[in-house]
Image: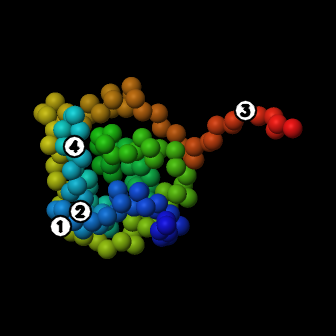
Amino acid sequence: MPHSSAGVTWSPPLAAATATPDRENDGATLAGGRALETPFGIFYSPNITPDPVTGIGRWSLAELSRALRQGRSPQGEHYYPSFPYTSYTGISDADVADMWSYLQSVEPVQQPNRPHALPWYLQYRPLLLLWKLLNFASAQGPPQAASAPAVPWPR
């Protein structure tokens, strides 16, 4: 059964992937540190609790929106595509606000983010702009359902 908080509904698979504590590593919910192994190296999930020192507690709603829709940090750095901004780019303002409300409601956890384990040539973030120019199209607003061709009803 989906869990709802601050207008955001989390389906069980999504909740398991994003909000479960990292029990294997004694981690807290949304505090980061989970490894994502890829052919490019290992990415570690960030702390997205409202902790003002190690989490997103000092972020504004606009900064969260820019991270989700454009893949940019509050300091303007490009996020790696392992951060799923390519999937969030089309969400509505209301959905961003609901996510913001939910994230502000969770318990803050002071846990520093782990640096990604990447080859030296992938650690230069400005190169991510080139990847974005070739592979990313920002889309504001909710995705529109494709209209299906009309199928006549058999009589």
> Of the residues shown, which amino acid type is indicated by label 4?
Glu
- Of labels 1 and 3, earlier in sequence is 1
Marks 2 and 3 sit apart, C-alpha to C-alpha, by: 45 Å
- Of labels 4 and 3, earlier in sequence is 4
Q: Mark 1 points at which residue?
A: 26
Q: How crowded is mark 3: few (under 14 residues within 10 Å), some or many (20 or more)?
A: few
Q: SS for tag 2?
A: loop
Residue 148: tell me if it is visible: yes
Provide residue 70's location: percent of width, then percent of height.
42, 43
Marks 2 and 1 sit apart, C-alpha to C-alpha, by: 6 Å
Does residue 26 lie above or below 41 as drawn?
A: below
Q: Mark 4 points at which residue?
A: 37
> Of the residues shown, which amino acid type is indicated by label 2?
Asp
Decide if residue 71 is on the left or right side of residue 98: left
Q: Name the residue under label 2.
A: 22
User: In this view, which residue lies farthest toward the right?
Assistant: 155
Marks 1 and 3 sit apart, C-alpha to C-alpha, by: 51 Å
Q: Name the residue under label 3.
A: 149
Provide residue 144's location: percent of width, then percent of height.
62, 42
- Of labels 4 and 2, earlier in sequence is 2
Q: SS for tag 1?
A: loop
Marks 4 and 3 sit apart, C-alpha to C-alpha, by: 41 Å
